[in-house]
Image (cartoon, grey):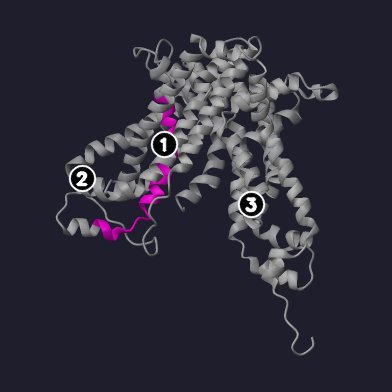
Amino acid sequence: MKAGSKVPDVRSTRRTGANPYRWVLTFLVGLVGVVFLAPTGYLLAGTLSLGGEVWATLATSRTLRPLANSVAIATSVALSCMVLGTTLAWLVARTDLPGRRMWRVVLPLPLVIPSFVGATALLSAFGPGGLLPLVPRTEGFLGAFVVLTLLSYPFVYLPVLTRLHTTDPSLEEAARLLGNKPVRIVARVVLPRIRNTMAAGTMLVFLYGLSDFGAVSLMRYDTITRAIYSARLFDRSTSFTLGLVLAVLALSVVALERSFGRDPRPGRSGGEEQVSYRLGAAVLPAMGLVIGVAGAGLVAPLGVFVFWVLRGSSTVGSGYAGIGEGLGFLLRPVVGSGLAAVAAAVCAAAVTLPVAYKAARHRSRVSGLAATTVTSLFALPGLVVALAIVFWAIRAPGPLAALYQSFPLLVAAYVLHFGAQSMRASRVAIADVSRRYDDAARTLGVKAYRRFFAVDLPLILPGVVAGAGLVLLSTLKELPATLLLAPIGFDTLATRIWNAAEDGFFAEVGIASLVLILLSGILTWGLVLRRELRL
């Protein structure tokens, strides 16, 4: 290099240098955004094509009653989970509750039980032939409320628990020195610092309750998802209209959740010893609450399934008669669930990686809109996404019509609905990688695509795999999309449990549910709980 020559500014090159691969990446990101926008767009276009039928459908009791029921169950479950999840997190994180370390791990475990599995256990545990035959069977709103609350409170419990371990303890210490009682400290100091975390978890529970199909259907509670499923083939105007209403409601909740700011930042290091409060005489009610929630949300369903397996069944054609019977009938559902889940996980990671990379490294309007589209589709109920795909496939032109009830279309539905989980994990992993590695490779003349495969990909691969694992977990438990789009004869654990419960083959429901819970538990522990609880 000649004396006085200027050394190239890598940062300037990174901002302004021409990169032909960037245009290819932008095209791919835009294409992904359009594909993820398609279900919502098709649903909107289909509804508008109905013209005056839309308003006629909206004004009928067939629409208003299920809509009101959906809002009622989602709101009540969200509020109950906010109170229950926050209380349990507070007891575990900030009190002298006996066995806190054990409860910290046990309390989030109801996450592994799908809602339709929990509802099946509750329905069959009471009444004639159940574990408690003298206790009347719970159905309708109350049954759905109990099931969804017991299985959804971890959505509030986990983030609040994490937040309570990172707040600045100096404010609580100051309030204590000023003579404030614990109740006043909690109300005036702690709750304002965790309220946005509570709100975010509560909104997530609201979306879960709004989109639930399995529990409300089994409980015979007439919600909008149940109405959509019932009218999916014979009443196109109702299906389109209710689907769009549910989509608008879900997206409105997401927009509301984004309007909340973040909680105040944690303490100086986020690792200071937190203030602990003595329960005193309240230790017995606190222990009763913790034991009751864990027992009802985790131990009781597992106990019901084990009871069914041990009791067996004498029903001809049940597929499983009890202990001593072979489990060969589960081979096809397990293989089906595994194939669909792995295919969806791999495809979701591959499809959303360009969006995550572009959004993290080269922000633009295209990447921002694509990322928003992917995220918004995750907020929609799976039934709505599947419904849009079903209507499109039925009316698809030419050879595309053959995709209806095919394995590729089923996997595509999973990818569209759960792709945001993979994108978020990949985006975080990419953002955590220092750009110095890329700059160093750039100065050595390494081309963009080689820099990505040689430098970036090995560093972000753990995050990409974790995101794919979340998609895999969600796919294992997905029910409505599988019922609507699965090929004829294709069986998964979710559909096997659903069909066996409808036929009354409870021994089969028990063993299949235990297998599904075991698989979900392993994935939930490795992908969610170990990270959230830092174990």
Secondary structure category for the residue under label 3: helix
Q: Position of residue 525 (x, y in %)?
A: 52, 44
- Mark 3 is on which residue type? Ala
- Answer whether residue 320 is visible to the viewer in this image: no
- Whole-percent x, y for residue 137 in the image: 39, 13
Disc with the residue nearer the chain's start (2 vs 3) = 2
Decide which of tag 3 and tag 1 comes sooner along the chain. 1
Which region shows up in magenta? 146-172
Q: Is residue 505 left or right of residue 344?
A: left
The residue under the point 28% across, 61% down is 170
> In the rendering, at what x and y percent does residue 158 appear?
43, 44
When asked about the image quadrant of residue 377, the answer is top right
Q: Nearer the viewer, residue 524 or 422?
A: 422
State the SS at label 1.
Answer: helix
Can you identify the residue that label 2 sits on?
A: 183
Which of the numbered marks, if any, corresponds to residue 359? 3
Secondary structure found at label 2: helix
Between 224 and 11, which is closer to the camera in this rendering? 11
Q: Residue furthest left?
A: 179
Magenta span has 167?
Answer: yes
* Closer to viewer: mark 3 or mark 1: 3
